[in-house]
Amino acid sequence: MFTGLIREIAQASLKNSNLLEISAAYKPNIGDSIAVNGACLTVVRKSNNSFFVELSHESKKVIETDNLNAKVHIEPAMKLSDRIEGHVIQGHIDCTGTIVKIQKNENNYDFYITVPKEYIKFIIPKGSIAVDGVSLTINEVFNDSFRLTIIPHTVKNTLFNDYRPNKVVNIETDMFARYIYHIFKEKKSLSWNEVDNIMAKW
């Protein structure tokens, strides 16, 4: 599990189709889980100034691999004793999205991102989303896109500072939205007693 609070911006280099080298100040152990642009990957090798993670066939199908010979966000897996300041992220990328518009406001930036329509049902106004591993709040949802309002601190301290329209990013929708949808997708309606029972279990 991760929080979506970026530990470091590191340099990634794809050595072959399965092995990714990460040059970073952070020093993990072999076997550790680390999120690279939001994707949970396993450390399989270390050197003096870098470590290596392995890409599975499934990961390469889902994530934006064109971003892996560049700067990347990294975040080590959280400990149970850690304070959660972002939101709970699994590191399981759902899809990629495309930044289509960036609008500067008085003291923040609006980013508009399109995603495949089948994932919009997991994207909820005022809910959480991870974009390239960054925990963010959704402000508005459209037919096949959503709007994020990002403060200058976040822009300055993440790769959002470099993002421009047409940039493709990794998207992880909210875990709880996915679970709830999966549980209730066959139900046509719920009684208030059923709602009360569900709430009592959470």
Image: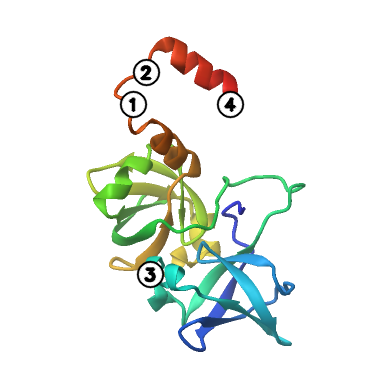
Q: Is residue 57 above or below residue 81?
A: below
Q: Name the secondary structure under disc 1.
A: loop
Q: Which mark is residue 187?
A: 1
Q: Name the secondary structure under disc 3.
A: helix
Dot 4, how many residues are within 10 Å of its Cα: few (below 14), some (14-19), or many (20+)? Answer: few
Three-letter amino acid code at the position of disc 4: Trp
Q: Quadrant of residue 141?
A: top left
Dot 2, how many residues are within 10 Å of its Cα: few (below 14), some (14-19), or many (20+)? Answer: few
Q: On the picture, is 9 further left or further right than 118?
A: right
Q: Which mark is residue 190?
A: 2
Mark closer to the chain start, 3 or 1: 3
Question: Separation of disc 1 and disc 4 at Cα?
Answer: 19 Å
Q: Residue at x 55, y 51 (%)?
A: 89
Residue positioned most to the right? 81
Three-letter amino acid code at the position of disc 3: Lys
Q: Quadrant of residue 201?
A: top right
Residue 108, percent from left and from top:
43, 50
Q: Residue at x 66, y 59 (%)?
A: 77
The reply to whether discs 3 and 1 touch (Cβ–Cβ < 8 Å) is no
Q: Quadrant of residue 184?
A: top left
The reply to whether discs 2 and 1 touch (Cβ–Cβ < 8 Å) is yes
Q: Which mark is residue 202?
A: 4
Mark closer to the chain start, 4 or 3: 3
Q: On the picture, is 156 further left or further right than 105?
A: right
Residue nearest the viewer, comparing 20 with 142 = 20
Q: Residue at x 48, y 67 (%)?
A: 159
Three-letter amino acid code at the position of disc 2: Leu
